Amino acid sequence: MRLPGVARFDYIPGEMKQTIVMYGNPVLREKSRVVEQVDDTIRTLARDMLDTMYAHEGVGLAAEQIGRTESMCVIDVTGAKPRPGRAPEPAPAMPMPVVMINPKITAMDGSQVGPEGCLSFPEVYVNIRRAATVRASWMDLDGKMQEADASGLLARAIQHELDHLEGVLLVDRMSVAQRVAVAGKLKRLKRGE
């Protein structure tokens, strides 16, 4: 399915060029800075981010996760592994992969709870409550504004990546009990182990 006005990004896979920043690195707490102009540097960064995300089998990656502070993220939920005991995810409401520059969530509705992980928190998975549907707006790699509605895993991924752009991390969304349950893993990540 293709939405009117949503440009298709023709991604050609390359090799991973970036290292994932792990929990404990201060750049993960930085708020992103607005991208003023989409140029070849931004397009190259988008391709590097996609290569890195795919190499780590992720469904999303924000610039902060590779030590950058541009307000941009990449998402592709088509390769997500099915969750046991759950119905398969519907096809995403927009072409994948999507590169979101200066993204914003303009509307949220409903509630969903599901397992969430993060490339900056390897081997940490917890159930997180998120909005069930979101409407997002962003600039694409042609510098054009886009808007689309998303639900399910895509809505979750958008919310997760936009949290990163605000310096909000998975650990900030955890309950006290969840933080206690993964405290050992979090300490090892902070120490760089």
Image (tube, grey):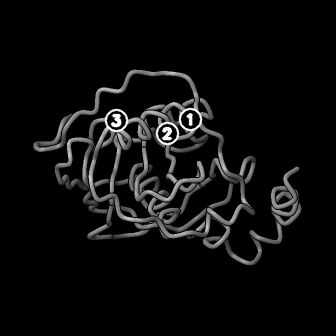
Residue hosting label 3: 96
Label 1 SS: helix
Residue sitting at x 41%, y 35%:
44
Binning the other alpha carbons within 10 Å of mark 1 as few (below 14), some (14 to 19) or many (20 upward) gives many
Q: Nearer the viewer, residue 69 or 102?
A: 69
Where, by quadrant of the figure, is residue 155 drawn?
A: bottom left
Label 2 SS: helix
**Total count of labels:** 3
Tell me residue 169's x, y (percent): 61, 66
Residue sitting at x 58%, y 43%:
85
Say what amino acid the circle numbered 3 marks. Answer: Met
Residue sitting at x 16%, y 42%:
3
Residue hosting label 2: 49
Residue hosting label 1: 52
From the viewer's perspective, tell me whether residue 127 is left or right of residue 133.
right
Tell me residue 139's x, y (percent): 25, 53
Tell me residue 27's x, y (percent): 62, 63
From the viewer's perspective, tell me whether residue 117 is left or right of residue 44.
right
Of badges 3 and 2, the one in the foreground is 2
